[in-house]
Amino acid sequence: MKKWTKGAFLLTLIFCLQSCTKDFQDIDNVEVTSWQPEVAVALVNTSVSIQDFLDNFDSGGHLQVGNDKFMTLVYESNVFSVSGDKVVEIPDFTIPVVDTSIVVPYSMLNTSFDLDFFSIKSGQLDYSFQSPYTEDMDVIIEVRNLTQNGTKLQFPAVADYTGSSPVNVNGSIDLTGYIMDFVNDEIEIRYIATDMTGNRRYLDNMQMDFNSFEYEVVQGNFDQHIFDLPSDTILIDFFENTVAGNIQIEDPKIRLIINNSFGVPIQMTAQHLQAQMVTGENMNINTVLDNGVSFAYPSATEVGQFKTTTIEVNADNSNLADIISSQPRQINYEWNAVSNPNAVPNLVGFVKDDSRFDVDVELEIPVWFSAQNFEIEEVSEFDASFLDDVESAEFKLITENGLPVEAGVQVYFLDDNGTVLDSLLNGTNEALIPSAIVDSNGRVTATSTGEEIVEIAGTRIDNIRTATQIGINGTVSTANMGTVAVKFYADYGMTFKLGVKAKLRE
């Protein structure tokens, strides 16, 4: 009897389409006793819910079940933008102070944006000058653009004469916590140098080096900036075993959830949005993103806050329904984003060093479709050794179908080269499982019952003994020759009961 354990495993693969192996138990109500076999065994009695069958992802997707138990397949991905400190960078700059009071134009900073101000997270001012006098000098330096708590930066420096001239003086000021404000697009620096009697003097070669800036927030007039966004892929395993037939998915969606803390207008465009089919063909997805969409941004009084925008791509604004119904294995995408997309002159906005926008991408495939001979096929290894002592076998399968589709199945036995040696059933894709009974809304109201008896004997047993692979081919059709779309709910399922009688070799 040990070899019948292998037989039970094989038959479970065949009739349960590999979805019910986890719930084997002895059958009490499959009528095998009336067959009077040499060997009679009740093999399988199991129920499989459609939720268990679908909730089996390798690609990061998940099954979402609503309050009404309606099911949606959800595949997710995420794109991160670069951080704010990579969008706006404050360059180092040097100002030669050629007089006791100078005003230099902002343009000498050579920044990519016309900045109004920035708060300094870290940075420093390195200063140096020479005193040509043969006496001590007291110096007060003031940078009128730098303030802290409303007070302008002012600091002392002393030139101590020690017997040689000129006296070289240098030092550094930590600018952390200061605000650099470019009033009238100018930078103003003053100094007062006095000798021991209080007379004012001029100094030589004074230089101010502003460097190593990191900011907390910067405000200014923002021209266009292109954000460098990475490409990504959504893997879809729902169609990975399909080989033929037509299926029309109802109401698929791609949803983009954008969280943005940049204080400037930004527009995002689909630079590349393409589906790769199970056939290897590529198809472009045409959406509202082709022409660009703008998303919300915080105002000057909302610095540090995120604004959320949701963009939905659906059958009304794209060809997504046709794309998904063409059975993609993955969706490849790359977005392009630009600030100030309309090139508005003197557009005032802000950026924090940690500003960013996140784009969560969700693909929703409702389990709601019409299907006409939608065909699924899977090939597995096959161990035929359990047939060594079998002369003939007869299997009896009873099914209770709680799904609103008619299902057919065929099983092929193949050799190492994939050549078909025999099939389990006569013909192609015998319709073993009739559709459940549905109401006018397409909701299942009662299960249907099917019964099938399959006999294998003679040369067919010999053919199967040489097989090394088994191919399971199933077809699904919805009502009215596949023209009616039906919804699938988590409480739908099927029950399989299987018995076998066999004649062993003498």
Image (tube, grey):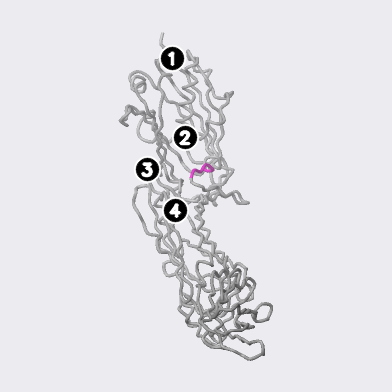
The quarter of the picture where the C terminus appears is top left
Q: Secondary structure at mark 4?
A: strand
Residue at the disc numbered 2: 17
Of circles 4 and 3, the one toward us is 4
Of circles 3 and 1, the one toward us is 3
Residue 436 screen position, x and y as percent: 52, 41
Residue at the disc numbered 1: 503
Residue at the disc numbered 4: 233
Lower position in the chain sequence, tag 4 or tag 2 = 2
Q: CA distance from mark 4 to mark 3?
A: 23 Å
Residue at the disc numbered 3: 243
Could you tell me what secondary structure mostly forms the magenta stretch?
loop
Work out whether residue 198 or residue 191 is closer to the camera in this orientation and state it: 198
Residues in magenta, as a range: 54-58
Residue 268 screen position, x and y as percent: 47, 67
Tag 3: residue type?
Val
Mark 1 in CB contact with mark 2 (< 8 angstroms): no
Q: Secondary structure at mark 1?
A: strand
Q: Secondary structure at mark 2?
A: loop
Tag 4: residue type?
Thr
Tag 2: residue type?
Leu
- Label 2 crowd bin: few (<14), some (14–19), many (20+), radius 10 Å: some
Q: CA distance from mark 2 to mark 3?
A: 15 Å
Name above or below for residue 273 compared with residue 494: below
Of circles 4 and 2, the one toward us is 4
**Extreme residue in the top direction:** 506
- Label 3 crowd bin: few (<14), some (14–19), many (20+), radius 10 Å: some
